[in-house]
Image (cartoon, rainbow, N blue to C red):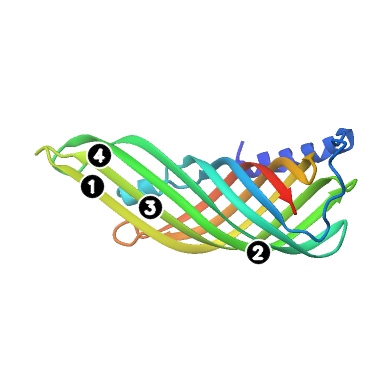
Amino acid sequence: MTPRPIAALLLPGLAACVPLYVAPEDAGEPGMSSPYVQGMIGVSHVSRDPRAAVAGGGNGSATLPLLAAAVQIPMAGEHVQTGFEWGGTFAWDHDRTVVDDGTGVAAADDDLVLADLFAGLSLVTWFGETARLFAGAGPVLQFGWTELEYEDQGGETVWVQDSAAGGGIYARAGLELPFSSHTWVGLQVRWMDADLDFGGDAGSVDLETAQWVLSVTQGF
């Protein structure tokens, strides 16, 4: 099943559980005009692995561990709030691969780092003044870095590094249930599309990314 149908099934399913959820007694009233800080951990799946492009072509995908943080600032509304959000994500991967540089075939260590900074509009809807359903969308600045290290036939260690930056857009949606006073935990899905220009033979790499994230949100 592709990422978008999975996302379409997960969030409605969680929303259906909200009426059955009993909030902690100390959950308290949500701060309707207060900022919210989110910490997130999950996985990031990119449609095209930049390492394949830098190495000379290919469309192999990659799944990377992900850390992220965001801030949401409500500006108007009570049970339906509109406002702004910003934050960043960091994903990384280390793998072993085989390269042929023309002098022979060798095993190589390769690394990939993907990070982004984002800012956009946010929308939060409250269920029973405890559970929160949120969404956000806007522009994103994407960064990428790859490194390939191997030993050639002459015994020399070879490092190949490439980095890139580019712009794109993101959208995300999530559902969180109260855990304790002004603290919520939940699940979100984030989608992003950005172009990274590595230059040289690799050129521009179009990265369409789907991210599944567990989040903890603290209200102030």
Label 2 vs 3, first from the N-terminus: 2
Secondary structure, mark 2, is: strand
Q: Which mark is residue 145?
A: 3
Left or right? Give the position of 47 relative to 155.
right
Residue annotated with mark 4:
99
Label 1 vs 3, first from the N-terminus: 3
> Residue 30: x percent and y percent?
83, 51
Q: Residue at x 66, y 43 (%)?
A: 215
Distance between the alpha carbons at the discs numbered 2 and 4:
41 Å
> Residue 98: x percent and y percent?
27, 35
Q: Which amino acid type corresponds to the residue marked 1 in the rendered image?
A: Trp
155, 51: nearer the viewer: 155
Q: Determine crowd level at label 1: few under 14, some 14-19, many 20+ residues with C-alpha closer than 10 A.
A: few
Q: Which amino acid type corresponds to the residue marked 2 in the rendered image?
A: Gly
Q: Determine crowd level at label 2: few under 14, some 14-19, many 20+ residues with C-alpha closer than 10 A.
A: some
Q: Which mark is residue 65?
A: none
In this view, the mark in front (4 or 3): 3
In which image quadrant can residue 21 be found?
top right
Distance between the alpha carbons at the discs numbered 2 and 3:
25 Å
Q: Which amino acid type corresponds to the residue marked 3 in the rendered image?
A: Trp
Residue annotated with mark 2:
120
